[in-house]
Amino acid sequence: MAAVGPERKGFNSHLWQRYHHISREVGDIESVRPLGRAFVVEVVVVRSQEGWGVTYTSTEICTLKGSTVKIHCTYTYPPRIHGNVTVLETASWFTEGKDQAPVDLMTQTEYADRVQYQCGEKECTLVIEDLRERDSAEYKFRFTTNQPGGSYTGTPGVVLFVKVPHVEVTKPYPTLWPSWAKLKCRSTCHVTAGDSIMWFKNGQRTHAGNSFVEVYFGNEDSVSCAVRQHQRVPSPSVCVLRPTCNKVTYTDRSICAPKGSSVDISCTYSPGNGVVSKSWFNPHNNNHLRRDKDRVQLHETGAGRSTLRIRDLRDTDSAEYRFKFKTGDFEWGNDLPGTTLTVTTLQVQVNRIIAVHESYTDVELKCHSSCKPAAHRSYIWFRNGQKDTIQQTSKYRDKFHLEDNVSCAFKGYEDQSPLVYPLKLPSIFASPSGEIVEGMSVNLTCFTYANPAAKNTLYKGNQTLPLGSAGIYHFSSISSEDRGIYSCKSEDQHSVSLVLDVQYAPKLPSVSVNSSGGISEGTSVTLSCSSDANPAANYTWYKEDEDSTKASGNNFTISDFRSELGGNYYCEAQNSRGRRRSRFHPIEVEVRHFSGSRKFPVNLVMKVVFLVVFILSSLVWIRKKSLTRQRWTEDKPDSSLEMDEIQNTLQAITATENPYSTIPASGQRHEQCAVNSAFF
C-alpha cells in the first residue's frame, strides 16, 4: 500500500508534483473550499474515448487523518456495439496493479471494513472511513461490460492526500521578549481558515480561533492544535520555548482488539519536575477502571513511559483512555484526546454467492470484524458445532445446505460469533431456464430461504421493481429492452445479481452509403448494413431482380463502380432467431464533366439551338415583311394574308420540333419550301 511522502516506497513523487502544480494554478491553496470533511480542488476531469468515459468530480483531494472521504465519478459506455446491447458487468476502484489487472480495494486487507462502494446508474462513489496517512494514493475507477474488449479505466485518477496538522513556533523578539512566541497551526491541506482551529496548552483546551496565536508562554509549556471537525486527530504536542517541556505522547490513537483478549495502551510523558501522581482514566466514565481493578493493571515500562493493561476484554471496555500526571506546581490537562479502544466481536457475513442449486448453495463466507486488530490473527470456523481444522483465514468457501449453521472466532479467543445460516441469503433466477427469447412469458424470482420469511427487493439499476407473491416479477411478453442486470437485495443488505439475456431476431436493418468523391464512374462505393439483434446478426447483400448474392458481411464494397451496376440494393440480417431484409437503397451513376458540370447529349443540344434560331429568324422576317407592305400600300393590310403567313410559319416550327412527323402533302410541302426559301 502506498505510504505518505515522496521518499516513502510505493508513493510516487509525481503525486506530490501534481498536487503542488494544482496549488500554483489556483493561487493561494487556502482559498480552496472545504467539501464535507475534505478539501477539494474543484476540477471536473473527463477521460473518454469513442463513447467510453469516466468523469471525476475532482482531481485532487486533501483531508485529515481519521476523517471520511468520498471520491465520486460518473461513467459512460456505448449502448450498443454492432447491434449488441452493452451490459455492465463489474465496477471497482483500485490503487494497485496495472489497468488490465487492477487490485480491487474490496479485496485488500488494509482497507478491510473501511471501504464502501455506493454505486448507481452510471455513477459510483468510493467511501473510505477512518483515513490513515498510508491511504494517500491515486485512486482510479474501472468498469467492464459484456462487449469484447469492453472495459475502461479512468486514467489519471484522483489523488488523495491524508495529513496530520502540526504547530510551527517562531520567536519574533527573542532578545526583547524571549517568552513571546507566535504559533501557527499548519497542514498540507491548508484547512486553517476562520474559526476552525482548536488550541490546547499543556493538555487543556484554551480557545477556538484562527490559525495564528501570539502570547507569552512559560518555559515548560507545550501546545497542540486540531481542526474543529477533527478534534480526535490533534497535532503532536510541541515545546514552545525549550527543547523539553511538559507533554504526553500516545503510542496509538486507536486500538482494535478481539473480545476476551488483552490489550496494552501506552504513552510517553515528559514532566518538567518530579512527578507527584499519575493515572489513566476514561473521560466519559470515571468509575470504569476503578470498578474493574481485577482486570486492570498499570505498568511503568521505562522512564517516562506508562502502560495501561486490560485483560479479558468486554464490549463495555470500548472507550477512550487518557493519561494525566501531576508535579509539585503543574497538572497535565484532561482535554487532549487520548487512545480509543474498540473491542470487536465477530460476525459471519455472506461475502459472495458463486452458485445457487436446488439442494445447496456454493457460497463464500467472511468472518467480519467491526475493526481490524493490530496483530495478525488466525481464524477458527465452526460448522454445525464442529471445528473446521482446515479453514484458518477470514474467508470460508464451501457448499452449504439448508440445515447448516456456521460461526467463527479468533484463534486463541474462541468466543464464537453468533450462528449464521448461510442459506438465509438472497437468491435470484429466471424461469423457464435456458435461453430466453423475445415474446416469451418469463418469471424472475427474488427470494431468501428464511423462517420467518424475509423481505426482499428487486432492482434493475436504480429502478425498484414490484414483487408479487412468492417474490416473483412477471414478464408477460419479454422484450429486448428488458435485457440487463437485475439485483435481489435482502433485508440485511446482502445482494445477488443476475444477467438476464434476451435473444431476438434482427430488427429492421439500416443501409448507408459511403463513397469517395460522390458516386461517379470508376469511384469506390461502400454499402454498410446494421441491425439490432441478439445474438449478433450475419449480413448478406442482394440487388433487386437478381437471385445471386453480391457479398456477405456488414460492408459491401464496389471498388470500380460503373453505370451498368446502378440499381436498388438491399441487405438481409440473419441470426438463429430469424431474418429480416432492409428497404431498397437506390444507387445511380452521377455522370460529370472533368469540371464537374453535367454532360448533355450532343444531338439534343443541336436541336435546341436550331429551334431557337429558327423561331427568332421567323419572327424577324414576319415583322420586316409587314412593315414593307405598310410603306408601299396606303390601304390597310390584308389581315387574312398575314394570318396565313403566321400559320405557315408555325407549321414550319412544328415540323422543325418533330423531324420525324408525317411528311406533308405536296401542296403543303411547296408552301413550306417557299417559306424556307424566303427565310434563307
Image (cartoon, rainbow, N blue to C red):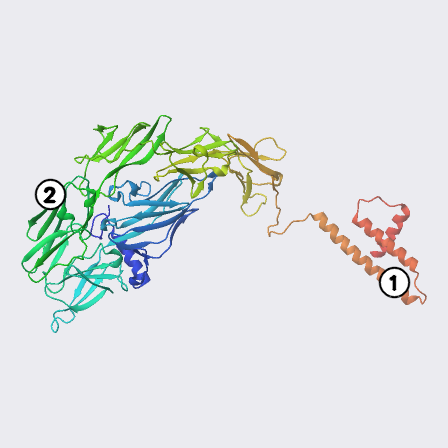
| Residue 266 falls left or right of residue 658 | left
Quadrant location of the C terminus? bottom right
* Image point (7%, 63%), residue name: 329
Residue 410's image quarter?
Answer: top left
Give the Cα distance between marks 2 and 1.
146 Å
Residue in front for this viewpoint, 483 or 316: 316
Is residue 90 visible to us here?
A: yes
Quadrant location of the N terminus? top left
Cβ atoms under marks 2 and 1 closer than 8 Å: no
x and y, in percent, of residue 509 in the image: 55, 38
Q: Callout 1: helix, strand or loop?
A: helix
How many neighbours does mark 1 have within 10 angstroms: few (below 14), some (14-19), or many (20 or more)?
Answer: few
Residue in front for this viewpoint, 516 or 627: 516
Residue in front for this viewpoint, 656 or 233: 233
Residue 19's image quarter?
Answer: bottom left
How many neighbours does mark 2 have within 10 angstroms: few (below 14), some (14-19), or many (20 or more)?
Answer: few
Residue 471's image quarter?
Answer: top left
| Residue 628 falls left or right of residue 581 | right
Give, as a three-letter code, the residue at label 2.
Answer: Asp
Is residue 53 visible to us here?
A: no
- Residue placed under numbered mark 1 in the picture: 626
Q: Relative to 312, is 675 above or below?
A: below
Outermost residue on the left side: it is 274
Q: Earlier in the sequence, mark 2 or mark 1?
A: 2
* Marking on residue 294: 2
